[in-house]
């Protein structure tokens, strides 16, 4: 799964929130990270998961990325015709 930063949000060290977008199995996935170590995952606009208390936004992103991949892998296993990108 390839994540791209949403460049309409501020990015980099001074950003308070970062937004990343990917697609898999025909669904739009979004991860929002916060500098205090929280992150949210939305799939097709619906809240799918939340992590908190990580050491940094980067750690929160990596944890959420793992969750997103597990969710989408489960959907691919259930539907052999589904393909990720």
Image: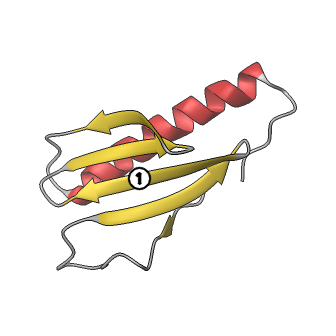
* Residue 50: image location, x then y, percent: 31, 36
Compared to 48, does 59 lie above or below? Answer: below
Which residue of the protein is positioned furthest toward the top in this rendering? Answer: 78
Q: Residue at x 44, y 46 (%)?
A: 65
Left or right of 18 in this view: 24: right
Q: How many marks?
A: 1
* Residue 62: image location, x then y, percent: 37, 50
What is the quadrant of residue 19 in the picture? bottom left
Q: For the C terminus, give its image quadrant.
A: bottom right
Compared to 85, does 18 lie above or below? Answer: below
Compared to 29, does 7 lie above or below? Answer: below
Q: Nearer the viewer, residue 46 or 31?
A: 46
Q: Residue at x 59, y 60 (%)?
A: 2
Q: Residue at x 45, y 72 (%)?
A: 6
Compared to 71, does 17 lie above or below? Answer: below
* Residue 32: image location, x then y, percent: 34, 55
What is the quadrant of residue 27 in the picture? top right
CA neighbours of label 1 inside 10 A, class few (<14), some (14 to 19), many (20+): many
Residue with the mark numbered 1: 31
Task: Indicate the colouring scheme.
Answer: secondary structure
Q: Residue at x 63, y 25 (%)?
A: 74
* Residue 47: image location, x then y, percent: 41, 37
């Amino acid at each position: 799964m390839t994540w791209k930063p949403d460049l309409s949000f501020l990015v980099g060290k001074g950003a308070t929130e970062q937004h990343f977008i990917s697609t898999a199995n025909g669904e739009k996935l979004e991860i929002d990270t916060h500098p205090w170590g929280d992150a949210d995952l939305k799939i097709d606009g619906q809240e799918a998961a939340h992590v908190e208390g990580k050491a940094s936004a980067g750690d929160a992103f990596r944890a959420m990325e793992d969750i997103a991949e597990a969710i989408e892998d489960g959907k691919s296993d259930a539907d052999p015709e589904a393909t990720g990108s």
